[in-house]
Image: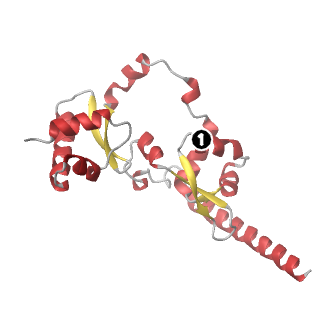
Amino acid sequence: MSLIPALEAMLLMATEPVAAADLAAALDAPLPEVERELAAIADFYDEHGRGIRLRAVAGGWRFATDPAVADVLEAWLVSDQRSRLTQAALETLSVIAYLQPVSRGRVAAVRGVNVDGVVKTLLVRGLITEAGEDPVTGAVTFGTTPLFLQKLGLNSLRELPDLAPLLPDAVALEAELGQMAAAEAAEAAQVTKETSDG
């Protein structure tokens, strides 16, 4: 018996991408067979020009609309301005995506403005998360989440476009940020030394 009807039904009901291994476990089916069937479903929707597509995103599979009908959907849906990210939020999210794990201070240095409020918004929206501490400064660092990948339709961060053509000074900027981080660490070490000596 084909697994395709069950896979389609499960993925239609899913609210987040579902890993092939989870689908295989739920159906008590071999993973390679489930992966073959998922690829067959994706090919079917692509080849037949349907309004939906099956995509591998954020480490799992989910149905998505065909990009070709984006204009129709945009005109049909009532736009909720509160759900849109501001330009500041998009810029901050971009910096975090490309430099992660990155501290709030480094993001602020790149953007040239305070990013505290924007970072809080991105955390609440589930697009970024705390990713540990900066080994040099001890500051909390941030990285993107699977929801970020899902919203962008990416399967991994490796699929982000290369930054170099869009921002020729990216290498110089990263070097400058590294120097700033080293200077902050040296200053913190000096303060610690002075405190312990005093």
Please tell me whether residue 132 is drawn above or below residue 145 in the rendered image.
below
Task: Give the side of residue 15 with respect to residue 169, left or right.
Answer: left
Q: What residue lies at 73% left-to-right and 47% top-to-bottom?
A: 114
Quadrant assignment, res 175? bottom right
Quadrant assignment, res 168? bottom right
Q: What residue lies at 70% left-to-right and 54% top-to-bottom?
A: 109
Circle 1 Cα neighbour tier, 10 Å, few/some/many (<14 / 14–19 / ≥20): few
Label 1's element? helix
Image quarter hosting the N terminus? top left
Task: Give the side of residue 62 with respect to residue 128, left or right.
Answer: left
Please tell me whether residue 23 is drawn above or below residue 63 in the rendered image.
below
Single out the residue that lies furthest toward the left. 1
Task: Give the side of residue 158 with respect to residue 111, left or right.
Answer: left
Residue 47, percent from left and from top: 17, 35
Please tell me whether residue 134 is drawn above or below residue 111 in the rendered image.
below
Quadrant assignment, res 143? bottom right
Task: Give the side of residue 13 with respect to residue 181, left or right.
Answer: left
Q: Is 13 or 28 nearer to us in this picture?
A: 28
Q: Is 67 or 117 nearer to us in this picture?
A: 117
Report the amino acid beneath label 1: Val
Which residue is under mark 1? Answer: 124
Q: Is 163 or 148 nearer to us in this picture?
A: 148
Image quarter hosting the C terminus? bottom right
Residue 46, percent from left and from top: 21, 36
Query: How many numbered marks are there?
Result: 1
Single out the residue that lies furthest toward the bottom. 197
Please tell me whether residue 50 is drawn above or below residue 14 in the rendered image.
above
Residue 183, percent from left and from top: 74, 70
